[in-house]
Image (cartoon, helix red, strand yellow):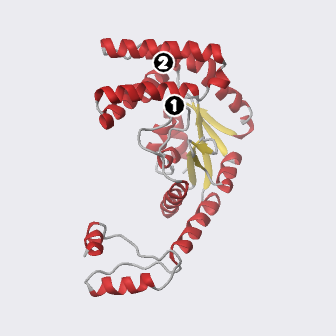
C-alpha cells in the first residue's frame, strides 16, 4: 500500500534494481496487477548511471559549447535563465560559484549533481539547439565538481562576454549578497537566528579568500561588513553594504576577472551589453 500511495503521488516514476536483478521485475509485475503500469529500467541503477555519465561526456559533440563570461555582478545567470539553449550549472549545483555563492540549502551530492546535469543535457539535446550555452565556471562550483571531459570542452569553447557598468552591478550584488541572502536565512531560521547566521555567512565567505586578500585588506573588509551589519540592524538600511562590496570588486574580483579574461582573449568571439548579447545569440541559433 505504501508503494502504491507513493506511485500515485509520482506517476512518472521508473522502477529499477541497484544491480539490475529480478526483484524490480517482480515488483513491477505486482504493481501492474494492482492496476498501475510503471516502466522498468533494464540493467538497473548501474546501467542508468553509465548512460548518464556517457550523456555528459558526449554532450559537447551534440551541440557546440558556448561560454558566457562577464565580470562579477554583470548578470550572467540572468541571461542564462532567459535563454532556451542554456543549461544552468550554478542552479544544478545550488551554488553561485564564488566565495559568497553558498546558499542556505545544502548542495546536492556529487552523484546527484552529475545525474541532474545529465538529465538537463538530455532535455537540451531533445530541443536540438545549435549551441549549448554555459556560464563561465571553475571546475568546482562550491563542492560540486564538473566532470573532467565536460569541463575540458568548456575550457576550449568559444566565449561571448557580457559587459555591464559598475552602477548596474552594485545593486545586483547588494541584492544577491545581502538582501536576498538575508531573506533566505530569516525565512529558514527566524528573524534573530537568521540575522546571526547571515552575519556568520558573510564572515566565513570573507575568510575563504583571506589568503588571497592578505591580512590587512581582509580586516578592512571585515570592519566594513561589521559596520554595515550594525547599521542595517539598527536602521533597517542596507546601503552601507555597498562600501565593502565596492572595495571587494576593486581589490579582488575585478582584477582577478581581468587577469583570467586576458588569458582567454583568443577564444572571445563577441562582446557587448545584455541587449547585444541577446541579439547575437538570436542571430546564431
Closer to the camera, 193 or 243?
A: 193
Closer to the camera, 277 or 3?
A: 3
- Horizontal relation, residue 107 to residue 265: left or right: left
Name the residue tied to disc 2: 167
- Horizontal relation, residue 47 to residue 36: left or right: right
Name the residue tied to disc 1: 100
Q: Earlier in the sequence, mark 2 or mark 1?
A: 1
- Horizontal relation, residue 48 to residue 191: left or right: right
Residue in view at x 51 percent, y 47 percent: 93
**SS at mark 1?**
loop
- The percent coordinates of residue 28 (x first, y second) are 37, 83
Q: Classify mark 2: residues with Cα within 10 Å, few (<14), some (14-19) or many (20+).
A: few
Residue in view at x 47 percent, y 21 percent: 170
Point out the frontmost of discs 2 and 1.
1
Vertical position of residue 133 compared to residue 274: above or below:
below
Q: CA distance from mark 2 to mark 1?
A: 20 Å
- The percent coordinates of residue 42 (x first, y second) are 50, 81
Amino acid at each position: 500500500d505504501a508503494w502504491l500511495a507513493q506511485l500515485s503521488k509520482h506517476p512518472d516514476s521508473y522502477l529499477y534494481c541497484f544491480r539490475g536483478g529480478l526483484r524490480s521485475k517482480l515488483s513491477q509485475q505486482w504493481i501492474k496487477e494492482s492496476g498501475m503500469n510503471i516502466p522498468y529500467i533494464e540493467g538497473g541503477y548501474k546501467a542508468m548511471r553509465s548512460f548518464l555519465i556517457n550523456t555528459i561526456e558526449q554532450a559537447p559533440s551534440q551541440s557546440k559549447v558556448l561560454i558566457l563570461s562577464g565580470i562579477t555582478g554583470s548578470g550572467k545567470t540572468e541571461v542564462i535563465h532567459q535563454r532556451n539553449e542554456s543549461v544552468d550549472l550554478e542552479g544544478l549545483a545550488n551554488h553561485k560559484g564564488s566565495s559568497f555563492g553558498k546558499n542556505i540549502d545544502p548542495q546536492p551530492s556529487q552523484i546527484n549533481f552529475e545525474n541532474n546535469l545529465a538529465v538537463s543535457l538530455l532535455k537540451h539535446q531533445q530541443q536540438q539547439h545549435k549551441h549549448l550555452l554555459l556560464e563561465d565556471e571553475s571546475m568546482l562550483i562550491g563542492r560540486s565538481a564538473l566532470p573532467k571531459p565536460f569541463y575540458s570542452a568548456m575550457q576550449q569553447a568559444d566565449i561571448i562576454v557580457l559587459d555591464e557598468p559598475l552602477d548596474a552591478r552594485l545593486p545586483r550584488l547588494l541584492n544577491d549578497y545581502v538582501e536576498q541572502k538575508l531573506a533566505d536565512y530569516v525565512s529558514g531560521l527566524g528573524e534573530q537566528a537568521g540575522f546571526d547566521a547571515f552575519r556568520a555567512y558573510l564572515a566565513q565567505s570573507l575568510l575563504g579568500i583571506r589568503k588571497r586578500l592578505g591580512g590587512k585588506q581582509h580586516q578592512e573588509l571585515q570592519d566594513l561588513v561589521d559596520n554595515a551589519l550594525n547599521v542595517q540592524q539598527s536602521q533597517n538600511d542596507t546601503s552601507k553594504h555597498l562600501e565593502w562590496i565596492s572595495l571587494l570588486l576593486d581589490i579582488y574580483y575585478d582584477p582577478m576577472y581581468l587577469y583570467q579574461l586576458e588569458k582567454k582573449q583568443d577564444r572571445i568571439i563577441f562582446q557587448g551589453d545584455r541587449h547585444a548579447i541577446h541579439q547575437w545569440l538570436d542571430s546564431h541559433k
